[in-house]
Image (cartoon, grey):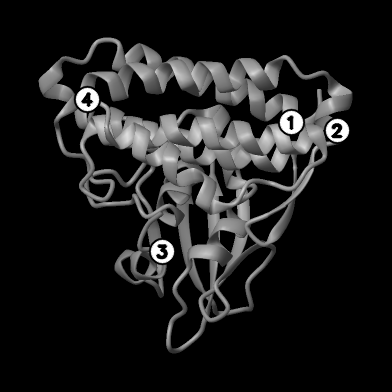
Amino acid sequence: MTDATRVLRALRASQQRLSDLVGGLGDADLERATSDHGWSVAEVLSHLGSQSEIFATFIDAGVQGTEPPSNESFVPIWEAWNAKSPRDKAADALSADAAFLATVEALDEDQLAHIELHLFGMDADAATLLSMRLGEHALHSWDVEVLFDEGAVLAPDATELIVDRLGVLAGRVGQPEDTPRHIEILSSAPTRRFVLDTGAVSLEPGNAPEGAARLEISSEALVRLVYGRLDERHLGVPAPLASGVDLDSLRAIFPGV
C-alpha cells in the first residue's frame, strides 16, 4: 500500500464519519456557531465543500502535468458556496466531498505516483496533497462534532498520519517567541518524540538538549494544539503534563489555522 493510498483510506473514513454526523443535524444545528473563526456549522461545511472542489483542481493538474490553478480562480468557487443556504451548504458539502474522493479513488497507482506539483511554496506529491486535505477535513470535522459531543476526539487513523506531518504545518503557521527555546514533546497513541524550536518555530523528530522544557501529551491533542484547537475543555487523554512550559505559551505560538 502506498502512502497516498493509506491517506486516501483515512480520508474516506473521515468523510463517512462527517456524513453520518451531518445527516442527523436539523436546521437549528446548522446555524450553531463553532469555535472555528466563529463560523456556523453550515459555514464550516461550506468551507470543506469549496475545498473539495479546489483540491480536485490540484489533483487534475497533477494528473495532467499542468500548473496548479491560481488563487484568483478560486474566487468564483468561494462566491458560489457563500451564496448557498445553510441546508444546501451542508448537503452540497457532503456531495462534493464524496465526489472528490471518488475522483481520486478512480486513479491507478501509476497516476498517483506521477502527481507532482509546486504548491504553497513546496513540492507536493499525491500523498502530500491528500495529507493536507486529511488535516483540514479531520480538524474541521472535529469543529463540528465537538459541538454535539464534548468528548469528541480526532480519529486514530487520521491522528497517526497527521502527527507525522505536523512539522510542515508548524513551520508555516507558528508564531516565534521573542526569547527562543527548545521544548521536548513526548506524545502518545502513537508514541512520538519531537523537539519544538520556538524561535524558528520548527517541530522535528529528535531529542531536546539536556534541561529543556518538556511536554507530555497525546498525539491527538498535539495535533489539535498545532492547529489551534487545544482549549481547557478538550485537553485530550491523558491530560497534558508540562514541565518548564505552560500551555498558554504554546497556544500563543500556534493561534490556529
* Residue 254: image tag: 3
Q: Is residue 153 visible?
A: no
42 on left or right of 19: left
Q: CA distance from mark 3 to mark 1?
A: 27 Å
Query: Which tag, 3 or 1, sits closer to the chain's start?
Result: 1
Q: Residues within 10 Å of mark 4 (few under 14, many from 20)?
A: few
Q: Residues within 10 Å of mark 2 (few under 14, many from 20)?
A: some
- Between residues 209 and 113, which one lies in front from this camera angle? 113
Q: CA distance from mark 2 to mark 3?
A: 33 Å
Q: CA distance from mark 2 to mark 1?
A: 8 Å
Residue 77: % across, % down = 44, 37
Q: Are marks 1 and 4 in contact (CB under 8 Å)?
A: no
Q: CA distance from mark 1 to mark 4?
A: 34 Å
Image depth: mark 4 or mark 2 in front = 4
**Residue on which disc 4 sits:** 85
**Residue on which disc 1 sits:** 4
Three-letter code for the amino acid on which mark 1 is drawn = Ala
Query: Which tag, 1 or 4, sits closer to the chain's start?
Result: 1
Does residue 207 lie above or below 96 as drawn? below
Q: Residues within 10 Å of mark 3 (few under 14, many from 20)?
A: many
Does residue 174 lie above or below 257 as drawn? below
Query: Which tag, 2 or 1, sits closer to the chain's start?
Result: 1
Query: Which tag, 4 or 2, sits closer to the chain's start?
Result: 4
Does residue 108 lie above or below 55 as drawn? above
137 on left or right of 41: right
Kindly give the residue lying farthest to the left in the view shown.
28
